[in-house]
Image (tube, rainbow, N blue to C red):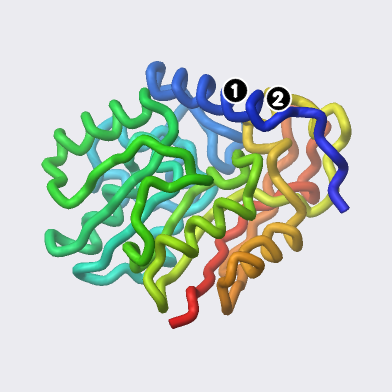
Amino acid sequence: MRKTSFIGAGEIRKAVRDRYGNIAKEAGSCCLPSASCCSGDRARAGSGAGYGPEDLAAVPDGANLGLGCGNPIALASLREGETVVDLGSGAGFDCFLAANRVGKNGRVIGVDMTSEMLEKARENAGKGDYGNVEFRLGEIENLPVAGNTADIVISNCVINLSHDKRRVFREAFRVLRPGGRLMISDIVLLKELPDEISNSIEAYTACLAGAVMKGEYLDAVGAAGFKDVKIIEETSLPEEDDGLIRAATIASIRVSAIKPG
């Protein structure tokens, strides 16, 4: 059982919004101060998270902020004409990659709670003339998307930041059509964090303190109603600079699941 955090939900939400709003304004780098997803060289960060040079070249400048911990698009098997919903879409990187896959007859909806990120994403969409992408302001616990809308829901290193992950997965289930797919990249724990990390708001906004144990994460997906819940890829993350987080403590996982048809 996970230890109780003393950080309130409202404090978490405000801290996350402030941090990622500043990242959008400053085009700064990301969660997890390690080579897995964060680097001053954002091209290298993207590549390290599972993106190839062709992915980085296929999106407008400014879309890749190095915020991911994996590449859900690579494993999503997107098809022409499908509708994609991206939870925590940031500056639009994964949305634009998805839009290239689903084509003009497809549709991509990005949801983010940070107005600065939405502004940047919409600016990037204009640069690339993405007529099949739209960005909506909203929280991933309360998606501004109608039920039975999406063929696939994706997310990249965002759900760990939510104070109510089970609600996020219920919302993902709601917006998916029967037979729809879930494909997410995220951070999970392989062992409990030290108290000084688990009760740190800075560690929460850096994608650490909000992470839950791997089994708990998968259970939350299944509890929402998803079937065939499985880990497609798993990568242990390097030791942190402060020496408190060891390589065996946290992992980046790619999880797939299906909404029964």
- Residue 222, compared with residue 121, is above or below; it is below
Could you give the CA–CA distance between mark 1 and mark 2, rounded to whole angstroms? 7 Å
- Residue 175, compared with residue 109, is above or below; it is below
- Residue 1, compared with residue 29, is above or below; it is below
Residue 209 position within the rendered picture, expressed as x and y whole percent measured from the top left? 73, 36
Residue 138 position within the rendered picture, expressed as x and y whole percent measured from the top left? 41, 38
Q: Are marks 1 and 2 in contact (CB under 8 Å)?
A: yes
Mark 1 crowdedness (10 Å alpha carbons): few <14, some 14-19, many ≥20: some
Judge from the rendering whether residue 61 lies leftward or rightward of residue 225; answer left or right.
Answer: left
Residue under label 1: 15
Q: Circle 2 — which element?
A: helix
The circle on residue 175 is none
- Residue 132, compared with residue 127, is above or below; it is below
| Amino acid on which disc 2 is placed | Ile
Q: Circle 1 — which element?
A: helix
Judge from the rendering whether residue 32 lies leftward or rightward of residue 69; answer left or right.
Answer: right
Is residue 243 visible from the viewing direction of this image?
A: no
Please state the total of marks drawn on the protein image. Answer: 2
Return the residue nearer the eye: 16 or 189. 16
Residue 197 position within the rendered picture, expressed as x and y whole percent measured from the top left? 80, 30
Q: Quadrant of the C terminus?
A: bottom left
Residue occupying the point 23% across, 63% down: 102
Residue occupying the point 36% across, 37% down: 64
Residue occupying the point 49% across, 74% down: 258
Return the residue nearer the eye: 51 or 115. 115
Residue 196: quarter of image: top right
Judge from the rendering whether residue 118 lies leftward or rightward of residue 28; answer left or right.
Answer: left
Residue under label 2: 201
| Amino acid on which disc 1 is placed | Ala
Residue 127 position within the rendered picture, expressed as x and y whole percent measured from the top left? 15, 34
Mark 2 crowdedness (10 Å alpha carbons): few <14, some 14-19, many ≥20: some
Disc 1 or 2, which lies upstream in sequence? Answer: 1
